[in-house]
Each structure stands twice: as C-alpha cells, then as structure tokens.
Amino acid sequence: QEAESALAFGAQGVGLFRTELLFLGEKQAPSLEKQILEYSRLLSAFPGKRVIVRVLDLDTDKPLPFLTLTESGKYANRGFQALLSNIEVLETQLEALAESSRRYPETELWVMAPMITNSSQAKQFVDMAKGYGLETVGVMIEVPEVCQEEVLAEILDSVDFVSIGTNDLTQYTLNLDRVNSAIALSDVRKPEVLGLIERVVSSSREASKPVGICGEAAGDPESAKLFIEYGVTSLSLSPALLPSLVRALRN
Ligand code: PEP
Ligand code: MG
C-alpha cells in the first residue's frame, strides 16, 4: 500500500519489507500461492529498483497460532531462531519469493533474515535461500553478539549484504525493553551503540559488502548524518519521512 507514496517521495527502492504483515492475525500460515501473489504485487511496483524483503520475524508479544516455539534462551523466540523451529514456514516463504522474483525479473530482489545470533545461522540462511534460486541474500545485524570482530568477519564471508536493525540493536545493547520502555530515537547515539554500528559499517566496507541501516534511526537526520559519515551504502525509512530527511541532508 505504501509503494505509491514511496515512489512519489523519491525512494530508490524498498529497504525493508516486513513480511509479518502477511502473517499477523491469520489462523494458519499464508499459502504458497497467497504469498506469491503478495510478493509479486510488491515486486511489480518497483521495476528497475531494488526491493529487500525480510523473512518472518516472529516476536513473542505477537504469537501466531500456527508456529511452535521450542527453544529457550535470550533470542530463541525471535527471527531466524524461531523460524528454525518452524522450518516449513521459512521454506514456503523462500519458495514464494524465488517464484515471484522469476515472474518479475526486472525488480532486483534481495532477501534477508532477521535476528541472526551467530555466524553459522547466517551461513545456514544463505545456503537455504540460494538453494531456492535467490541470488542476493543477506542478514540483519540486530544483536551485539554478532558485532564482535570475528563473528562479523565470518558472517561477512557468507552473505551478500548486511542491514543494521538499529531498533533491536539499541534495545539489546543498552538492555532496554522495546515493548515496555519506549526507546528514545536518540538512544542509538549512545557511544556503546554507535561504536558497534561504526564497526559493522567499516568491516562491511572492507569486505566490499553493502551495508544498510533499516531501523527508525535512519529517518532521523542527526543519526542519518553519522551513518553516512561512517559509510553506509543505504538508508531505509518510512516513505513519509523521506522528504524531510532529504531536505536535512542537503543542508
Ligand atoms: C530493527 O530492529 O531495527 C528493525 C528494523 O526490525 P524491527 O523494527 O522490525 O524489529
Ligand atoms: Mg528488528
């Protein structure tokens, strides 16, 4: 629904398409056909442009009746780890995305996994997605554990790109609770968080891998200026924020 306004405001593509929207409120996982239809609609709106789709990021505060949560641990019920316990959901998503991409080859589809918590998960996701014929596969950097130099280097070895999710990275680095204690937009500029972002950006650049920012902070001029200084290759924000960010960056 936002495609039109994104294009009208000058977006060069889609930096983060959250597929949760297809799943929330459903009694069963959307079928392969339904997902092909929806992803195809999305891709058809951006010919000649790049669209980054994120596979399902389940959150325990939005449980879905058709998903089982079997793992325990800090990040177990989120993102890629939750998908591993529901592998058929991930397989259907990847199949639907690959088929949609074949139907709309003029749109450059990139696919990424949320909440990767170690380098073997990144490799596993990339291998799986490429097995379905998806060409450009990446992961989100959202937890401090994967910002450690060695882990990051291993991740960058397997992926085609990374995208920094500053909402979660801020929450998990500062030990805040995003649901119960709203995070201030400026929290991302706390030195602990900025240090991690700077490191991820410079390592990615050294590895010649695109590195984007896709949390809310990307739409905040003060933070966006810093991210650009660090060397990010893209910023992803709500279409409505685009004109004011572009204005601020020109000044
Ligand atoms: C993030 O964590 O910054 C992000 C973009 O993902 P979400 O807000 O969907 O968790
Ligand atoms: Mg996130």
Image (cartoon, helix red, strand yellow):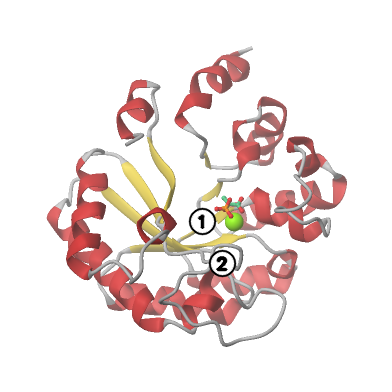
Residue 54 appears left or right of 174: left
Q: Is residue 243 above or below residue 56?
A: above
Residue situated in front as seen by the camera: 95 or 153: 95
**Residues tagged 2 and 1 counted as in contact (Cβ below 8 A):** yes
Q: Locate residue 213, reporting x and y percent.
A: 58, 45
Residue 107 seen in the figure: no
Q: How crowded is mark 1: few (under 14 residues within 10 Å), some or many (20 or more)?
A: some
Rendered residue at 49%/84% (across/down): 85
Nearest the viewer among 46 and 229 is 46
Circle 2 Cα neighbour tier, 10 Å, few/some/many (<14 / 14–19 / ≥20) = many
Q: In this view, does 230 lie above or below 90?
A: above
**Residue behind mark 1:** 209
Amino acid under label 1? Answer: Lys
- Horizontal and vertical percent position of residue 118: 63, 77
Q: Residue furthest left?
A: 103
Dot 1: element? loop
Q: In which quarter of the image is residue 22?
A: bottom left
Res 19 quadrant in image: bottom left
Q: Disc 2 on helix, strand or loop?
A: helix
Position in image of residue 161 (x %, y %): 48, 58
- Residue identifier under label 2: 156
